[in-house]
């Protein structure tokens, strides 16, 4: 089977391909953050991190930045795990590894497009509100908790990026991809936190953002089908 698999892995991707994947990771984070259910959570998340509505924009910005740093730390570690495990599984399973990853991408794409409906397990189901005056430590810990908990909207997109990171088997690239996802996911949170009036304006785009999320799901499905084609084309 391995001799019949004629697939050029992401490991051998060109510099331009990596740049595109980095951009896609960042945009994936942005799309995850502006999805309808994520937008609905924005006021709640700002309240969790900021502690109370009386925080000044500058203090809110610092707290939200630390919150995003916490998520970035977790996602960076996830990137390392994906790259390492991707190398191990690729060496063990060979060409079958691509089939496994393509299957995962297909399931993720079907989940994002809502063709499949299933619950994604989370590690942390609730987070305490920030009732302290901490500018750095508590928001940082909340960011770590939020990254572990995830949301129903962002988790499938994150899972897709994790699959690509595993397929790439490149440690530095995997770290950058997951870090950029964290930054992209946090951009809207910072904007909404500093400019609170923007939360209401963002909700007006819920229909558009829902279409963007589903479009990303269809794109992931197409990528998975392409991977299947590259694997099985030599057998036809």
Image: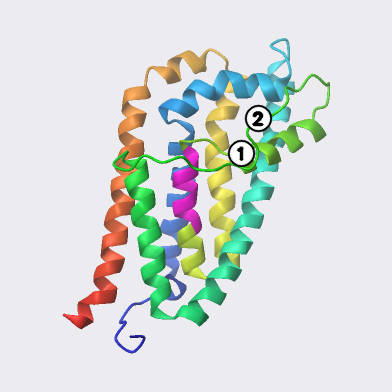
Residue extent of the magenta highlight: 154-162
Q: Hey, which residue is sitting farthest top in the picture?
A: 54
Q: Distance between the residues labelled 1 and 2?
A: 8 Å
Residue shown at the point (27%, 73%) measured from the top left? 230
Q: Is residue 167 visible?
A: yes
Question: Hey, which quadrant is residue 223 in on the image?
Answer: bottom left
Question: Do the residues under discs 1 and 2 have CB atoms within 8 angstroms?
Answer: yes
- The vertical placement of 156 against 55, above or below, is below
Percent x, y of residue 170: 55, 70
- The vertical placement of 11 against 26, above or below, is below
Q: As rendered, which of 125 and 205 lies closer to the eye?
A: 125
Percent x, y of residue 179: 59, 50
Residue shown at the point (81%, 35%) measured from the top left? 137
Disc number placed over residue 126 in the picture, else none: 2
Percent x, y of residue 201: 44, 16
Residue shown at the point (42%, 51%) measured from the top left? 24
Earlier-in-chain disc, 1 versus 2: 2
* Position of the C terminus by quadrant: bottom left
Which SS class for mark 1?
helix
Check residue 157 for magenta coloring. yes
* Residue bearing the label numbered 1: 149
Which SS class for mark 2?
loop
Q: As rendered, which of 126 and 182 lies closer to the eye?
A: 126
Instruction: Answer with left or right where residue 202 lies relative to residue 214.
Output: right
Question: Hey, which quadrant is residue 205 in on the image?
Answer: top left
Question: Hey, which quadrant is residue 150 in on the image?
Answer: top right
* Position of the N terminus by quadrant: bottom left
């Amino acid at each position: 089977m391995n001799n019949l698999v004629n697939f050029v892995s992401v490991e051998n991707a060109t510099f331009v391909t990596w740049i595109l994947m980095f951009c896609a990771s960042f945009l994936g984070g942005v799309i995850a953050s502006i999805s309808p259910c994520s937008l609905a959570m924005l006021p709640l998340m700002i309240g969790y991190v900021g502690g109370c509505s009386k925080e000044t924009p500058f203090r809110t910005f610092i707290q939200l930045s630390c919150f995003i740093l916490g998520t970035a730390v977790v996602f960076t570690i996830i990137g390392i795990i994906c790259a390492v495990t991707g190398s191990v599984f690729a060496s063990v399973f060979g060409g079958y590894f691509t089939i496994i990853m393509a299957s995962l991408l297909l399931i993720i794409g079907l989940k994002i497009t809502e063709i499949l409906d299933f619950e994604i397990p989370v590690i942390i189901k609730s987070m305490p509100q920030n009732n302290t005056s901490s500018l750095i430590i508590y928001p940082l810990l909340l960011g770590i908790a939020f990254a572990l908990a995830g949301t129903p909207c962002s988790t499938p997109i994150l899972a897709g990026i994790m699959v690509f990171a595993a397929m790439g088997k490149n440690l530095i690239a995997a770290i950058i991809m997951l870090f950029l996802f964290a930054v992209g996911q946090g951009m809207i949170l910072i904007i909404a936190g500093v400019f609170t009036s923007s939360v209401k304006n963002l909700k007006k785009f819920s229909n558009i953002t829902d279409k963007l999320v589903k479009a990303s799901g269809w794109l992931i499905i197409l990528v998975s089908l392409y991977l299947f084609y590259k694997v099985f084309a030599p057998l036809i």
